Protein backbone atom coordinates (compact mmCIF):
# COMPACT_ATOMS: atom_id res chain seq x y z
CA UNK A 1 0.00 0.00 0.00
CA UNK A 2 1.26 3.46 -0.88
CA UNK A 3 1.00 6.33 1.52
CA UNK A 4 -1.45 8.99 0.50
CA UNK A 5 0.21 12.38 0.33
CA UNK A 6 -1.81 13.50 3.37
CA UNK A 7 -0.24 10.73 5.49
CA UNK A 8 3.19 11.57 4.18
CA UNK A 9 2.71 15.19 5.15
CA UNK A 10 1.68 14.22 8.66
CA UNK A 11 4.72 12.05 9.09
CA UNK A 12 7.15 14.65 7.75
CA UNK A 13 6.95 16.60 11.00
CA UNK A 14 7.61 13.51 13.13
CA UNK A 15 10.41 12.50 10.80
CA UNK A 16 11.96 15.96 11.19
CA UNK A 17 11.92 15.82 15.00
CA UNK A 18 11.24 12.27 16.17
CA UNK A 19 10.65 11.43 19.82
CA UNK A 20 9.54 8.23 21.50
CA UNK A 21 6.61 9.95 23.17
CA UNK A 22 5.33 11.32 19.85
CA UNK A 23 5.52 7.82 18.37
CA UNK A 24 3.69 6.36 21.34
CA UNK A 25 1.00 8.98 20.81
CA UNK A 26 0.20 7.38 17.44
CA UNK A 27 -2.17 4.44 17.15
CA UNK A 28 -0.66 1.02 16.42
CA UNK A 29 -1.67 1.29 12.82
CA UNK A 30 -0.40 4.85 12.47
CA UNK A 31 2.93 3.80 13.90
CA UNK A 32 3.12 0.94 11.41
CA UNK A 33 2.59 3.47 8.64
CA UNK A 34 5.20 5.74 10.14
CA UNK A 35 7.71 2.88 10.09
CA UNK A 36 6.71 2.31 6.47
CA UNK A 37 7.38 6.00 5.77
CA UNK A 38 10.82 5.84 7.42
CA UNK A 39 11.92 2.80 5.44
CA UNK A 40 10.73 4.49 2.26
CA UNK A 41 12.87 7.48 3.13
CA UNK A 42 15.72 5.04 3.76
CA UNK A 43 15.47 4.03 0.12
CA UNK A 44 13.41 0.82 0.22
CA UNK A 45 10.38 -0.03 -1.81
CA UNK A 46 8.03 -0.86 1.07
CA UNK A 47 5.00 -3.16 0.86
CA UNK A 48 2.54 -2.69 3.70
CA UNK A 49 1.28 -6.19 4.55
CA UNK A 50 0.17 -5.77 8.19
CA UNK A 51 -3.18 -7.26 9.11
CA UNK A 52 -3.23 -9.61 6.13
CA UNK A 53 -4.74 -12.93 7.07
CA UNK A 54 -1.75 -15.03 6.07
CA UNK A 55 0.68 -12.25 6.98
CA UNK A 56 2.21 -14.29 9.82
CA UNK A 57 2.74 -11.21 11.89
CA UNK A 58 4.79 -9.49 9.22
CA UNK A 59 3.96 -5.80 8.98
CA UNK A 60 6.21 -4.62 6.17
CA UNK A 61 8.24 -6.08 3.35
CA UNK A 62 11.30 -4.11 2.30
CA UNK A 63 12.20 -4.53 -1.34
CA UNK A 64 15.40 -3.52 -2.97
CA UNK A 65 16.80 -4.03 -6.46
CA UNK A 66 20.04 -5.10 -8.07
CA UNK A 67 20.49 -4.16 -11.72
CA UNK A 68 16.78 -3.41 -11.92
CA UNK A 69 15.77 -6.82 -10.54
CA UNK A 70 13.65 -6.43 -7.41
CA UNK A 71 14.25 -8.74 -4.47
CA UNK A 72 12.87 -9.01 -0.97
CA UNK A 73 15.59 -7.65 1.32
CA UNK A 74 13.87 -7.78 4.71
CA UNK A 75 10.66 -8.38 6.58
CA UNK A 76 9.69 -6.10 9.45
CA UNK A 77 7.66 -6.53 12.58
CA UNK A 78 6.56 -3.38 14.34
CA UNK A 79 5.94 -3.20 18.10
CA UNK A 80 4.61 0.06 19.43
CA UNK A 81 5.25 -0.87 23.03
CA UNK A 82 5.77 0.85 26.36
CA UNK A 83 7.30 -2.30 27.81
CA UNK A 84 10.34 -4.22 26.58
CA UNK A 85 9.95 -6.82 23.85
CA UNK A 86 10.03 -10.40 25.19
CA UNK A 87 11.99 -13.43 23.90
CA UNK A 88 8.78 -15.02 22.61
CA UNK A 89 8.39 -12.28 20.04
CA UNK A 90 11.96 -12.67 18.80
CA UNK A 91 11.41 -16.42 18.57
CA UNK A 92 8.35 -15.88 16.46
CA UNK A 93 10.27 -13.67 14.03
CA UNK A 94 13.01 -16.30 13.93
CA UNK A 95 10.45 -18.93 13.02
CA UNK A 96 8.99 -16.80 10.25
CA UNK A 97 12.44 -16.10 8.83
CA UNK A 98 13.14 -19.79 8.26
CA UNK A 99 10.66 -19.58 5.39
CA UNK A 100 12.57 -16.67 3.86
CA UNK A 101 16.13 -17.78 3.20
CA UNK A 102 18.53 -14.90 2.70
CA UNK A 103 16.00 -12.33 3.89
CA UNK A 104 16.71 -10.16 6.93
CA UNK A 105 14.30 -9.73 9.80
CA UNK A 106 13.89 -6.37 11.55
CA UNK A 107 12.04 -5.89 14.78
CA UNK A 108 11.28 -2.23 15.38
CA UNK A 109 10.02 -1.08 18.75
CA UNK A 110 9.43 2.17 20.58
CA UNK A 111 10.72 0.47 23.74
CA UNK A 112 13.73 -1.82 24.29
CA UNK A 113 14.38 -5.58 24.32
CA UNK A 114 14.74 -7.71 27.42
CA UNK A 115 18.13 -9.31 27.90
CA UNK A 116 16.71 -12.71 27.07
CA UNK A 117 15.10 -11.33 23.93
CA UNK A 118 18.49 -10.03 22.80
CA UNK A 119 20.03 -13.41 23.59
CA UNK A 120 17.42 -15.07 21.40
CA UNK A 121 18.48 -12.92 18.48
CA UNK A 122 22.23 -13.11 18.98
CA UNK A 123 23.00 -16.36 17.14
CA UNK A 124 20.94 -15.28 14.14
CA UNK A 125 22.91 -12.92 11.95
CA UNK A 126 19.86 -12.14 9.84
CA UNK A 127 17.91 -10.61 12.71
CA UNK A 128 18.36 -7.00 13.65
CA UNK A 129 16.64 -5.69 16.78
CA UNK A 130 15.95 -1.98 16.59
CA UNK A 131 15.16 -0.52 20.00
CA UNK A 132 13.53 2.89 20.38
CA UNK A 133 16.78 4.80 20.88
CA UNK A 134 18.35 3.17 17.81
CA UNK A 135 15.23 3.84 15.83
CA UNK A 136 15.54 7.57 16.65
CA UNK A 137 19.21 7.56 15.62
CA UNK A 138 18.36 5.73 12.41
CA UNK A 139 15.71 8.31 11.53
CA UNK A 140 18.05 11.21 12.29
CA UNK A 141 20.83 9.66 10.24
CA UNK A 142 18.59 9.00 7.23
CA UNK A 143 17.11 12.48 7.35
CA UNK A 144 20.38 14.38 7.64
CA UNK A 145 22.35 12.32 5.18
CA UNK A 146 19.62 12.54 2.58
CA UNK A 147 19.33 16.27 3.12
CA UNK A 148 22.92 16.54 1.96
CA UNK A 149 21.88 15.18 -1.40
CA UNK A 150 22.43 11.44 -1.14
CA UNK A 151 18.88 10.80 -2.24
CA UNK A 152 19.87 7.69 -4.17
CA UNK A 153 21.63 6.02 -1.26
CA UNK A 154 19.92 3.14 0.50
CA UNK A 155 20.54 2.93 4.22
CA UNK A 156 20.05 -0.38 6.03
CA UNK A 157 19.38 -0.23 9.77
CA UNK A 158 22.24 -2.64 10.53
CA UNK A 159 24.54 0.37 10.30
CA UNK A 160 23.52 1.29 13.87
CA UNK A 161 24.74 -2.09 15.09
CA UNK A 162 28.02 -1.77 13.19
CA UNK A 163 28.52 1.70 14.64
CA UNK A 164 27.96 0.50 18.19
CA UNK A 165 30.56 -2.23 17.74
CA UNK A 166 33.32 0.33 17.08
CA UNK A 167 35.74 0.58 19.98
CA UNK A 168 36.24 4.32 20.04
CA UNK A 169 39.29 5.89 21.61
CA UNK A 170 38.55 8.48 24.23
CA UNK A 171 39.91 11.99 23.75
CA UNK A 172 42.10 11.28 26.79
CA UNK A 173 43.91 8.68 24.69
CA UNK A 174 43.93 10.44 21.35
CA UNK A 175 42.21 13.66 20.41
CA UNK A 176 40.82 13.36 16.90
CA UNK A 177 40.17 16.69 15.25
CA UNK A 178 38.64 17.28 11.82
CA UNK A 179 39.30 20.57 10.07
CA UNK A 180 36.38 21.29 7.79
CA UNK A 181 34.64 24.00 5.84
CA UNK A 182 32.93 23.45 2.53
CA UNK A 183 34.45 26.65 1.22
CA UNK A 184 37.89 26.44 -0.36
CA UNK A 185 40.96 28.59 0.16
CA UNK A 186 39.79 29.48 3.63
CA UNK A 187 42.71 28.15 5.67
CA UNK A 188 41.84 24.51 6.38
CA UNK A 189 45.17 23.08 5.31
CA UNK A 190 47.04 26.02 6.86
CA UNK A 191 45.28 25.38 10.17
CA UNK A 192 46.02 21.64 10.03
CA UNK A 193 49.71 22.05 9.24
CA UNK A 194 50.36 24.75 11.82
CA UNK A 195 48.48 22.86 14.50
CA UNK A 196 50.71 19.89 13.79
CA UNK A 197 53.87 22.00 14.01
CA UNK A 198 52.82 23.58 17.31
CA UNK A 199 52.05 20.16 18.78
CA UNK A 200 55.36 18.83 17.44
CA UNK A 201 57.30 21.54 19.26
CA UNK A 202 55.36 20.65 22.40
CA UNK A 203 56.51 17.03 22.05
CA UNK A 204 53.02 15.72 21.30
CA UNK A 205 52.81 12.87 18.80
CA UNK A 206 50.59 13.83 15.90
CA UNK A 207 49.17 11.87 13.01
CA UNK A 208 48.02 14.11 10.19
CA UNK A 209 45.59 12.60 7.69
CA UNK A 210 45.24 14.26 4.31
CA UNK A 211 41.79 13.49 2.94
CA UNK A 212 42.00 16.06 0.15
CA UNK A 213 42.90 14.80 -3.32
CA UNK A 214 44.75 18.09 -3.86
CA UNK A 215 47.35 16.78 -1.45
CA UNK A 216 48.56 20.22 -0.30
CA UNK A 217 49.15 18.96 3.20
CA UNK A 218 51.07 15.93 1.96
CA UNK A 219 53.30 18.28 -0.02
CA UNK A 220 54.03 20.31 3.12
CA UNK A 221 55.11 17.24 5.08
CA UNK A 222 57.82 15.55 3.04
CA UNK A 223 58.77 12.02 4.08
CA UNK A 224 61.72 11.30 6.34
CA UNK A 225 64.74 10.82 4.13
CA UNK A 226 66.50 8.07 6.09
CA UNK A 227 63.65 5.55 6.05
CA UNK A 228 62.39 3.39 3.21
CA UNK A 229 59.80 5.37 1.27
CA UNK A 230 56.25 4.16 1.81
CA UNK A 231 54.25 4.84 -1.37
CA UNK A 232 50.87 3.96 0.14
CA UNK A 233 48.31 6.70 0.70
CA UNK A 234 44.75 7.21 1.86
CA UNK A 235 43.48 6.03 -1.54
CA UNK A 236 45.33 2.74 -1.17
CA UNK A 237 43.32 2.17 1.98
CA UNK A 238 40.00 3.48 0.61
CA UNK A 239 40.25 1.15 -2.37
CA UNK A 240 40.81 -1.79 -0.01
CA UNK A 241 44.39 -2.47 -1.06
CA UNK A 242 45.90 -2.29 2.43
CA UNK A 243 44.90 -1.69 6.05
CA UNK A 244 44.87 1.92 7.22
CA UNK A 245 47.91 1.55 9.50
CA UNK A 246 50.11 0.58 6.55
CA UNK A 247 49.58 3.99 4.99
CA UNK A 248 51.25 5.82 7.88
CA UNK A 249 54.46 7.53 6.82
CA UNK A 250 57.18 9.14 8.91
CA UNK A 251 57.76 12.77 8.07
CA UNK A 252 60.90 14.82 8.45
CA UNK A 253 59.50 16.17 11.75
CA UNK A 254 60.21 14.30 14.93
CA UNK A 255 56.66 13.97 16.22
CA UNK A 256 54.63 14.24 13.03
CA UNK A 257 53.39 11.25 11.05
CA UNK A 258 51.32 11.46 7.89
CA UNK A 259 48.74 9.52 5.97
CA UNK A 260 49.22 11.22 2.62
CA UNK A 261 46.71 11.81 -0.12
CA UNK A 262 46.93 11.31 -3.85
CA UNK A 263 45.23 12.83 -6.88
CA UNK A 264 43.58 9.48 -7.66
CA UNK A 265 41.64 9.60 -4.40
CA UNK A 266 38.94 11.66 -6.09
CA UNK A 267 38.18 8.72 -8.41
CA UNK A 268 37.35 6.33 -5.59
CA UNK A 269 33.61 5.94 -5.21
CA UNK A 270 32.27 3.55 -2.58
CA UNK A 271 29.08 3.10 -4.64
CA UNK A 272 25.56 4.13 -3.75
CA UNK A 273 25.21 1.70 -0.87
CA UNK A 274 28.78 1.98 0.33
CA UNK A 275 28.86 5.46 1.88
CA UNK A 276 27.66 4.47 5.30
CA UNK A 277 29.82 1.36 5.46
CA UNK A 278 32.88 3.18 4.27
CA UNK A 279 32.47 5.99 6.84
CA UNK A 280 32.04 3.45 9.65
CA UNK A 281 34.98 1.36 8.48
CA UNK A 282 37.20 4.43 8.43
CA UNK A 283 36.12 5.41 11.95
CA UNK A 284 36.75 1.88 13.14
CA UNK A 285 40.18 1.72 11.49
CA UNK A 286 41.28 5.10 12.81
CA UNK A 287 40.20 4.34 16.37
CA UNK A 288 41.78 0.88 16.34
CA UNK A 289 44.85 0.19 18.54
CA UNK A 290 46.92 -0.58 15.42
CA UNK A 291 47.11 3.13 14.64
CA UNK A 292 50.36 3.96 16.44
CA UNK A 293 53.53 5.87 15.70
CA UNK A 294 55.58 3.35 13.73
CA UNK A 295 58.84 3.64 15.54
CA UNK A 296 57.23 2.99 18.88
CA UNK A 297 54.63 0.42 17.82
CA UNK A 298 52.30 -0.74 20.64
CA UNK A 299 54.23 1.29 23.24
CA UNK A 300 52.84 4.70 22.49
CA UNK A 301 49.78 6.21 21.02
CA UNK A 302 49.22 9.33 19.04
CA UNK A 303 48.23 12.22 21.25
CA UNK A 304 46.45 13.87 18.37
CA UNK A 305 45.05 12.93 14.99
CA UNK A 306 44.31 15.84 12.67
CA UNK A 307 42.09 15.26 9.64
CA UNK A 308 42.39 17.77 6.81
CA UNK A 309 39.33 17.59 4.58
CA UNK A 310 38.49 18.63 1.03
CA UNK A 311 36.43 21.59 0.01
CA UNK A 312 32.75 20.86 -0.71
CA UNK A 313 30.78 18.51 1.46
CA UNK A 314 31.30 15.07 0.08
CA UNK A 315 32.21 11.61 1.10
CA UNK A 316 35.61 12.32 2.61
CA UNK A 317 34.22 15.00 4.91
CA UNK A 318 31.74 12.42 6.14
CA UNK A 319 34.56 9.98 6.84
CA UNK A 320 36.33 12.64 8.87
CA UNK A 321 33.19 13.56 10.79
CA UNK A 322 32.39 9.91 11.55
CA UNK A 323 35.79 9.50 13.18
CA UNK A 324 36.41 12.87 14.84
CA UNK A 325 35.82 13.95 18.41
CA UNK A 326 36.01 17.62 17.46
CA UNK A 327 35.37 19.59 14.30
CA UNK A 328 37.01 22.96 13.76
CA UNK A 329 35.78 25.34 11.09
CA UNK A 330 38.38 27.75 9.75
CA UNK A 331 36.59 30.76 8.41
CA UNK A 332 37.26 34.20 7.05
CA UNK A 333 35.55 37.46 7.76
CA UNK A 334 33.89 37.87 4.43
CA UNK A 335 30.37 37.86 3.15
CA UNK A 336 30.19 34.35 1.75
CA UNK A 337 32.48 32.55 4.18
CA UNK A 338 29.47 31.21 6.05
CA UNK A 339 27.46 29.93 3.12
CA UNK A 340 27.05 26.20 3.12
CA UNK A 341 27.99 25.80 6.80
CA UNK A 342 24.51 24.40 7.41
CA UNK A 343 25.43 21.52 5.11
CA UNK A 344 28.52 20.86 7.20
CA UNK A 345 26.39 21.04 10.31
CA UNK A 346 24.00 18.53 8.80
CA UNK A 347 26.88 16.19 8.02
CA UNK A 348 28.09 16.44 11.59
CA UNK A 349 24.58 15.76 12.93
CA UNK A 350 24.18 12.80 10.58
CA UNK A 351 27.47 11.31 11.77
CA UNK A 352 26.53 11.89 15.40
CA UNK A 353 23.32 9.96 14.81
CA UNK A 354 25.11 7.23 12.91
CA UNK A 355 27.93 6.67 15.38
CA UNK A 356 26.01 7.50 18.53
CA UNK A 357 29.06 9.52 19.56
CA UNK A 358 30.90 12.74 18.64
CA UNK A 359 31.76 14.84 16.82
CA UNK A 360 30.84 18.28 17.98
CA UNK A 361 31.31 21.51 16.10
CA UNK A 362 33.88 22.83 18.55
CA UNK A 363 34.40 26.24 17.10
CA UNK A 364 35.15 28.53 14.22
CA UNK A 365 38.68 29.86 13.80
CA UNK A 366 39.01 33.19 12.03
CA UNK A 367 41.97 32.96 9.69
CA UNK A 368 43.76 35.20 7.22
CA UNK A 369 42.23 38.33 8.75
CA UNK A 370 43.53 41.36 6.91
CA UNK A 371 42.65 43.97 9.54
CA UNK A 372 44.41 44.64 12.81
CA UNK A 373 43.42 43.30 16.21
CA UNK A 374 39.89 42.00 16.63
CA UNK A 375 37.70 41.75 13.55
CA UNK A 376 35.40 44.78 13.47
CA UNK A 377 32.72 46.19 11.22
CA UNK A 378 29.55 44.91 9.60
CA UNK A 379 31.06 41.81 8.10
CA UNK A 380 32.55 40.73 11.41
CA UNK A 381 29.19 41.27 13.11
CA UNK A 382 27.38 39.27 10.43
CA UNK A 383 29.90 36.47 10.78
CA UNK A 384 29.50 36.34 14.56
CA UNK A 385 25.69 36.38 14.22
CA UNK A 386 25.87 33.55 11.71
CA UNK A 387 27.89 31.28 13.97
CA UNK A 388 25.77 32.29 16.96
CA UNK A 389 22.66 31.26 15.10
CA UNK A 390 23.94 27.70 14.82
CA UNK A 391 25.44 27.74 18.33
CA UNK A 392 29.03 27.38 17.18
CA UNK A 393 31.48 29.34 19.35
CA UNK A 394 34.25 31.37 17.76
CA UNK A 395 37.80 30.95 19.04
CA UNK A 396 39.13 34.10 20.67
CA UNK A 397 42.42 33.73 18.87
CA UNK A 398 42.41 35.39 15.47
CA UNK A 399 44.89 34.30 12.83
CA UNK A 400 45.82 37.44 10.94
CA UNK A 401 47.07 37.68 7.41
CA UNK A 402 50.80 36.97 7.43
CA UNK A 403 52.73 36.94 4.15
CA UNK A 404 55.14 34.53 5.86
CA UNK A 405 52.47 31.81 5.78
CA UNK A 406 52.27 31.92 2.01
CA UNK A 407 56.07 31.97 1.79
CA UNK A 408 56.39 28.96 4.09
CA UNK A 409 53.95 27.05 1.88
CA UNK A 410 55.75 27.99 -1.30
CA UNK A 411 59.13 27.04 0.14
CA UNK A 412 57.83 23.85 1.77
CA UNK A 413 59.07 25.13 5.15
CA UNK A 414 57.22 26.20 8.27
CA UNK A 415 56.78 29.07 10.69
CA UNK A 416 58.68 27.37 13.48
CA UNK A 417 62.33 27.39 12.36
CA UNK A 418 63.82 27.02 15.80
CA UNK A 419 61.42 24.22 16.85
CA UNK A 420 61.34 25.98 20.20
CA UNK A 421 58.26 26.20 22.26
CA UNK A 422 57.81 29.85 21.48
CA UNK A 423 58.07 30.67 17.80
CA UNK A 424 59.49 34.14 17.30
CA UNK A 425 57.15 35.36 14.61
CA UNK A 426 53.64 36.69 15.05
CA UNK A 427 52.04 33.97 12.91
CA UNK A 428 53.60 31.20 15.00
CA UNK A 429 52.49 32.94 18.21
CA UNK A 430 48.91 33.07 16.99
CA UNK A 431 48.89 29.37 16.21
CA UNK A 432 50.30 28.63 19.67
CA UNK A 433 47.50 30.67 21.18
CA UNK A 434 44.94 28.80 19.11
CA UNK A 435 46.28 25.39 20.15
CA UNK A 436 46.30 26.48 23.80
CA UNK A 437 42.70 27.55 23.48
CA UNK A 438 41.81 24.27 21.81
CA UNK A 439 43.50 22.31 24.60
CA UNK A 440 41.43 24.25 27.11
CA UNK A 441 38.30 23.43 25.12
CA UNK A 442 39.28 19.76 25.07
CA UNK A 443 39.88 19.61 28.82
CA UNK A 444 36.57 21.42 29.47
CA UNK A 445 34.62 19.11 27.18
CA UNK A 446 36.24 15.74 27.88
N1 LIG B 1 46.82 33.68 7.75
C1 LIG B 1 47.23 33.63 6.47
N2 LIG B 1 48.03 34.58 5.97
C2 LIG B 1 48.44 34.54 4.68
N3 LIG B 1 48.10 33.59 3.81
C3 LIG B 1 47.30 32.60 4.24
C4 LIG B 1 46.80 32.57 5.59
N4 LIG B 1 46.03 31.47 5.74
C5 LIG B 1 46.02 30.85 4.54
N5 LIG B 1 46.77 31.52 3.64
C6 LIG B 1 46.98 31.16 2.24
O1 LIG B 1 45.70 31.02 1.63
C7 LIG B 1 45.70 29.94 0.72
C8 LIG B 1 44.57 29.00 1.04
O2 LIG B 1 44.79 28.40 2.30
P1 LIG B 1 44.53 26.85 2.56
O3 LIG B 1 44.91 26.60 3.95
O4 LIG B 1 45.20 26.05 1.51
O5 LIG B 1 42.97 26.78 2.38
P2 LIG B 1 42.01 25.48 2.24
O6 LIG B 1 42.76 24.31 2.76
O7 LIG B 1 40.82 25.83 3.07
O8 LIG B 1 41.66 25.37 0.80
C9 LIG B 1 47.07 29.31 0.80
O9 LIG B 1 47.85 29.72 -0.29
C10 LIG B 1 47.66 29.82 2.09
O10 LIG B 1 49.05 29.96 2.01
MG1 LIG C 1 43.18 22.45 1.80
Image (spheres, helix red, strand yellow):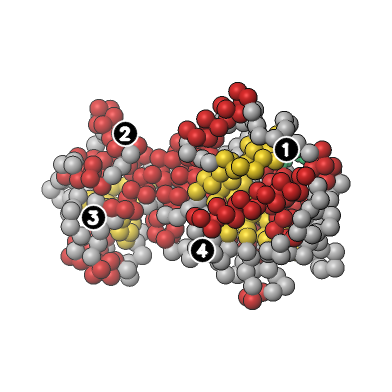
Residue tagged 2? 12
For the N terminus, the image quarter is top left
> Reading the chain from its start, which is encountered first: label 2 or label 3?
2
On residue 111, the disc is 3
> Reading the chain from its start, which is encountered first: label 4 or label 3?
3
Kindly give the residue lying farthest to the left in the view shown. 53
Pinpoint residue 70: horizontal percent, then vertical percent.
38, 44
Viewer-side label of 4, 3: 4
Pinpoint residue 220: horizontal percent, then vertical percent.
78, 51
**For the residues marked 2 and 4, what is the alpha-carbon distance in whole angstroms?**
36 Å
The reply to whether callout 2 and callout 1 are in contact (CB within 8 Å) is no
Question: Would you say residue 276 is visible in this rendering?
Answer: no
Label 4 CA crowd tier, 10 Å (few <14, some 14–19, many 20+): few
Residue 440 lies left or right of residue 15; in this view the side is right
> Reading the chain from its start, which is encountered first: label 3 or label 1?
3
Residue tagged 4? 170
Residue tagged 1? 400
Secondary element under disc 3, as helix, strand or loop, is: loop
Label 2 CA crowd tier, 10 Å (few <14, some 14–19, many 20+): some
**For the residues marked 2 and 3, what is the alpha-carbon distance in whole angstroms?**
22 Å
Front one among 153 and 137: 137
Amino acid sequence: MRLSSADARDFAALFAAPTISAMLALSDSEFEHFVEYVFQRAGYDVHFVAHQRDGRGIDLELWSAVNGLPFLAAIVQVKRYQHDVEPLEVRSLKGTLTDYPGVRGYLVTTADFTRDARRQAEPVADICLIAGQHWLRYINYIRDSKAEGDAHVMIAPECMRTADAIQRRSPQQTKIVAIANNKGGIGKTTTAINMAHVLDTLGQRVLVVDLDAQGNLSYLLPPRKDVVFNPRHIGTYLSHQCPLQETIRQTGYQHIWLIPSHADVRLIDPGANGYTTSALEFAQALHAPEITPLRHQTLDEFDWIILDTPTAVEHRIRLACAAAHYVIIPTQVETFAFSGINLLQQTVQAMRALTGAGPALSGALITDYHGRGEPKGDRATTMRDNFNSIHVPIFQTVIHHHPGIETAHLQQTNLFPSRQVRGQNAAAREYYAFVEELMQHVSDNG
